[in-house]
Amino acid sequence: MTRISASTAPAASAAMHAPAAVFSWRRVGAMILRHLYVLRRSWPRILELAYWPTVQLILWGFITTFFLQHSSWVARAAGVLVSAVLLWDVLFRSNLGVALSFIEEMWSRNLGHLFASPLRAYELVASIAIMGLLRTTISVAPAALLAWPLFDVWVFGLGSPLAAFFANLLVMGWCIGLVSSAVVLRFGVAAENFAWLGIFLLAPVSCVYYPVATLPGWLQTVAWSLPSAYVFEGMRAVLYDGVFRADLMWRAVSLNVVYLSLSAGFFLWICRVARLKGLLLRQGE
């Protein structure tokens, strides 16, 4: 054993009790390195860094292009834009209503308890879908009522077509929410931002604020594969031309039936994978 001499003991004692440096670049560098390691191993975080600026640029670029090409529409655009914002919020809140209802179970580490109970996976799907409906109604109703005194836009003036628009966007939101929940269940809470990323990725091709014809030809094919594009085209037909396009609504319904079946099946399959891989109790990043 090494013995500390009497001459070195005071120096060693002083070193042990010396106060830490007021500012250390080594400690700063260590914390930066720590976060870089987390970022390097987390693809959702890397995706998020470039995601929002890119989507905003694309979305408002198409809006600007549409208004430049159809300046005569600008005078009538206020009511259409407010109605579009409200209907878009139905899609957004429906997605979040489903995804957050599921992710909250992961945050509270309750999934293991739920799947140890008699609850079936398809019953979980039904419950979070109904919660999506309730959350959407609570979120959108006050905004729809405030649009009348603030902007002189009465969205309920759309009449019975509004119910068709609402139902189609609600179901599409369920589909996206179920896929987002499945991704979070498979990859952990590090992927929870996918609940927001997925819905806004579809915003430019959903043509919320401009017709599908504004998009480049190859993107129009993508847009017509989404129920939301048919809904917003139908909304503009009602507000601009006073015509309810039943053909657009039936195409939206058909796509929603297909997508709801696929998304529910995907979620149930991931639940089975999570059971086999023991992911229900391992819900970190």
Image (cartoon, rainbow, N blue to C red):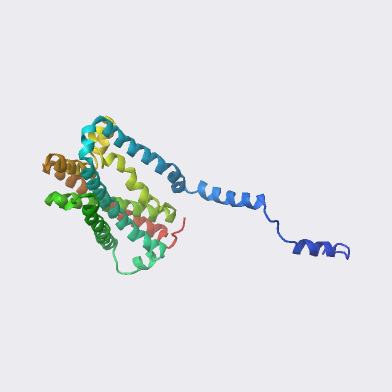
Above or below, 226 relative to 65: below
In the image: residue 161, left or right of residue 145: left
Residue situated in front as seen by the camera: 19 or 102: 19
Q: How far across and how far down the image is residue 227, in percent?
A: 22, 44
Above or below, 11 relative to 43: below
Q: How far across and how far down the image is residue 40, in percent?
A: 52, 46
Above or below, 206 relative to 124: above
In the image: residue 186, left or right of residue 78: right
In the image: residue 281, left or right of residue 269: right
Answer yes or no: is residue 172 visible: no
Residue situated in front as seen by the camera: 103 or 94: 94
Q: Residue at x 37, y 41 (%)?
A: 56
Above or below, 134 relative to 32: below
Answer yes or no: is residue 84 visible: yes
Residue situated in front as seen by the camera: 43 or 137: 137
Q: What number of labels is visible?
A: 0
Q: How far across and how far down the image is residue 122, in percent?
A: 26, 60
Q: How far across and how far down the image is residue 265, in percent?
A: 27, 52
Q: Residue at x 35, y 37 (%)?
A: 58
Q: Quadrant of the N terminus?
A: bottom right
Q: Residue at x 28, y 39 (%)?
A: 205
Which of the 4 quarters of the picture holds residue 3? bottom right
Residue situated in front as seen by the camera: 157 or 49: 157
